[in-house]
Image (spheres, grey):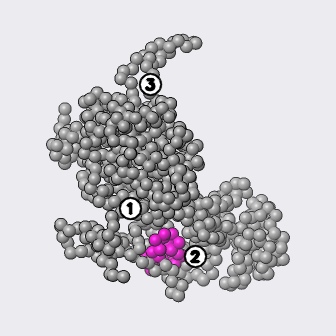
């Protein structure tokens, strides 16, 4: 499967990945509308920063995903064909066990409506995830393992 | 603190309708222009800090920022320009020399823009470079006085060879090289970008006077190592880590002036590369203290040839000054294999503004006079001419070659390809584009993979354009254009300018 690779030496901490992720997962999908009118703007990619060191991290779609193991409602699932781990937000009951077990800390609580776990879905319908496409310095790469 | 009289140069026009307060601009500006106001949830900008580098404008995801030249003007005065006044205000406050970066931006005549190139019609056919072979390969180095061909016996038949030994040559797949820009003046990622592009395209980059970083030794075949007055990082190993050696006498942006890399910029990496103690100022003296004559220069040229066992061409770089033609003649006689001439518009990381804007001569005139002088003296073939100092496009390249250059150096053009927006603040080491800085937070912004790709694209594009222009003029090899001034015509130039350039005015035919 294709995964997102991080080149931390070129991450410039501009956080454009976060911004485009928020837009992609917004209701309107339009940057101005989403940021001006929508309240639950949650990025599924996180830029970690200490001094000049920074990198953008999102769900690693683990081979043996602990979040899938820990999910009590069956919302968190790993697609056997694509290998992508997704959270079925309709099934999610908000117990946050996935957050407890995620070794990368890349699952977030979305409390805006019904509380659900929010995580990277690799922008399933796009050729490239939006964080990768919009990284100005190619610090994120989408390629086969 | 007394009142400062200079107002901000730029104005940040932020469209409130479009700004989503994402703070990309805040994070990207090394001059702290933008600030996020948590109480208001908006981004505020301080015009006075803006240097006009356009980083925020380029990265803003909604296009809400526009950097404008500030509208406020002084009472118009044809004699006292705003720049004169601002400089006086600045100097009255600081008492210092005004520093600047990049090349001269004053409205002196740009001769390239007064020269037109020829094309074929009826009497000689033009050539389509996409369908027919077109040779733009260039060789830099000393050529023999005459070629003597001899038959060489080889198993399986006779072939021909040269009777005389050819001096070592640099082979370029396009007559464009990357200028000397030292590691120190620009970031390692910027040097890696040019080195990688040069090696992939089959041309050369120049180390500048900053020594050779260990990560760049792999580009040996495409490196010209420079020996300047500071002799930073020079040893036998360094000299043999390149394909050619260039002695730097002068630089177009600051003829007659040395260099000074402040100790703060001499970090561990720069210090080991330059072979000087960490944190010490790297001072390049104005002259080479062992060169006070052509004879002294000859000694250094031959010392370098001895050190490289006569396997590498040794060149000399000078800035274009008033007596450039006789100086060039002396350099040829001193034994140089190529001469690099840097015009007064050439760039720099830091120079006193008064020098940058008032010293030297245009490269077009310098090139023409050097080429004519060397031809008159019958020594043009003994040396290759590389010209620099604001080659802005493939058209400038082709005009330079028709005026007599063998190849051109591009520095500013290469940096623009890497993202430079010519804000001329290189000397502050706060380059937001990750080029003229050593700050690790900023140097990361230039990914050498992207940089090299962009430079390769530029060289590719220029090669295609050069071939198109050559084809249009019915020429199928760049060698046939070299010094072929019949292909040039001047527009709006005086008799004197035309005679120095050695070209006819537009409208004059055979």
Compare residues A48 and B487 and report the one nearer the observer.
A48
Using the image, determine if residue B97 lies above or below residue B293.
Answer: below
Quadrant of the rendering where the N terminus of chain B is positioned: bottom left
Chain of the residue where label 2 is placed in the rendered structure: A
Is residue B397 shown to the viewer in this render? no
Q: Is residue B435 left or right of residue B403?
A: right
| Residue B260 image offset from top left, x and y in percent | 42, 57
Q: Residues within 10 Å of mark 1 (few under 14, many from 20)?
A: many
Compare residues A28 and B71 and report the one nearer the observer.
B71
Q: Earlier in the sequence, mark 1 or mark 3?
A: 3
Q: In the picture, residue A125 is in which quadrant?
A: bottom right
Looking at the image, do the residues carrying marks 1 and 2 touch, with CB atoms under 8 Å apart? no
Question: Residue A28 shows which numbered tag?
Answer: 2
- Element class at badge 3: loop
Is residue B149 shown to the viewer in this render? yes
Q: Is residue B15 magenta?
A: yes
Q: Main secondary structure of the magenta part?
A: loop
Looking at the image, do the residues carrying marks 3 and 2 touch, with CB atoms under 8 Å apart? no
Q: Is residue A143 left or right of residue B314?
A: right
Using the image, determine if residue B428 lies above or below residue B154.
Answer: below
- Alpha carbons under labels 1 and 2: distance apart: 42 Å
* Magenta part of the chain: B13-34
Q: Residues within 10 Å of mark 3 (few under 14, many from 20)?
A: few
Using the image, determine if residue A143 lies above or below residue B179.
Answer: below
Is there one chain holding both mark 3 and mark 2? no
Q: Residues within 10 Å of mark 2 (few under 14, many from 20)?
A: some
Chain of the residue where label 3 is placed in the rendered structure: B
User: Mark 1 highlights which residue?
Assistant: B424
User: Mark 3 highlights which residue?
Assistant: B166
Q: Is residue B43 left or right of residue B147?
A: right
Q: Residue furthest left?
A: B495
Residue depicted at x 78% and y 79%:
A96
């Amino acid at each position: 499967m294709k995964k997102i690779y991080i080149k931390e030496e070129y991450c410039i901490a501009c956080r454009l990945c976060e911004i485009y992720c928020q837009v992609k997962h917004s209701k309107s999908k339009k940057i101005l509308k989403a940021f001006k009118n929508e309240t639950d703007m949650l990025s599924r990619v996180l830029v970690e920063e200490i001094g000049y060191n920074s990198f953008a991290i999102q769900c690693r779609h683990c081979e043996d995903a602990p979040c899938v193991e820990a999910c009590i409602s069956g919302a968190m699932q790993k697609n056997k064909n694509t290998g992508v781990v997704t959270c079925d937000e309709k099934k999610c009951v908000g117990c946050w066990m996935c957050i407890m077990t995620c070794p990368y800390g890349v699952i977030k609580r979305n409390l805006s409506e019904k509380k659900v776990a929010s995580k990277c879905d690799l922008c399933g319908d796009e050729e490239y995830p939006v964080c990768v496409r919009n990284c100005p310095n190619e610090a994120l790469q989408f390629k086969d393992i | 603190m007394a009142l400062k009289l200079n107002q901000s140069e730029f104005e940040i026009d932020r469209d409130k309708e479009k700004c989503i307060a994402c703070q990309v601009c805040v994070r990207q500006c090394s001059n702290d222009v933008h600030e996020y106001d948590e109480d208001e949830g908006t981004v505020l900008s301080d015009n006075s800090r803006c240097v006009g580098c356009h980083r925020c404008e380029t990265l803003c995801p909604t296009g809400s920022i526009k950097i404008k030249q500030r509208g406020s003007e002084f009472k118009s005065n044809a004699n006292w320009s705003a720049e004169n006044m601002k400089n006086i205000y600045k100097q009255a406050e600081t008492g210092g020399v005004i520093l600047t970066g990049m090349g001269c931006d004053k409205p002196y005549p740009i001769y390239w823009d007064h020269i037109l190139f020829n094309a074929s019609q009826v009497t000689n056919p033009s050539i389509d470079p996409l369908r027919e072979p077109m040779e733009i390969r260039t060789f830099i180095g000393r050529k023999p006085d005459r070629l003597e061909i001899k038959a060489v016996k080889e198993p399986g038949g006779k072939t021909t060879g040269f009777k005389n030994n050819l001096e070592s040559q640099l082979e370029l797949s396009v007559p464009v090289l990357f200028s000397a820009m030292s590691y120190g003046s620009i970031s390692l990622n910027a040097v890696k970008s040019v080195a990688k592009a040069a090696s992939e395209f089959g041309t050369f980059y120049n180390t500048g006077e900053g020594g050779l970083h260990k990560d760049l030794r792999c580009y040996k075949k495409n490196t010209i190592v420079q020996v300047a007055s500071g002799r930073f990082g020079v040893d036998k190993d360094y000299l043999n880590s390149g394909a050619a050696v260039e002695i730097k006498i002068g630089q177009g942006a600051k003829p007659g002036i040395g260099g000074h890399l402040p100790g703060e910029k001499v970090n561990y990496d720069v210090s080991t590369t330059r072979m000087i103690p960490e944190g010490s100022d790297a001072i390049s003296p104005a002259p080479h203290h062992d060169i006070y004559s052509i004879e002294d220069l000859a000694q250094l040229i031959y010392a370098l040839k001895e050190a490289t066992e006569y396997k590498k061409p040794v060149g000399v770089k000078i800035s274009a000054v008033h007596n450039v033609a006789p100086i060039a003649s002396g350099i040829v006689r001193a034994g140089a294999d190529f001469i690099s001439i840097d015009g007064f518009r050439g760039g720099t990381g830091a120079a006193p503004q008064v020098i940058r804007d008032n010293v030297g001569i245009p490269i077009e005139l310098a090139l023409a006079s050097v080429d004519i002088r060397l031809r008159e003296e019958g020594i043009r073939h003994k040396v290759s001419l590389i010209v620099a100092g604001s080659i802005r496009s493939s058209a400038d390249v082709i005009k330079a070659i028709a005026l007599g250059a063998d190849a051109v150096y591009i520095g500013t053009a290469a940096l623009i390809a890497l993202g430079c927006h010519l804000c001329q603040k290189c000397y502050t080491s706060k380059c937001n584009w990750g080029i003229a800085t050593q700050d690790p937070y900023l140097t990361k912004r230039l990914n050498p993979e992207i940089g090299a790709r962009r430079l390769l694209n530029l060289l590719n594009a220029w090669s295609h354009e050069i071939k198109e222009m050559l084809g249009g003029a019915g020429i199928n090899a760049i060698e046939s254009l070299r010094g072929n001034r019949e292909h040039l015509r001047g527009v709006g130039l005086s008799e004197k300018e035309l005679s120095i350039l050695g070209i006819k005015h537009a409208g004059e035919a055979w």
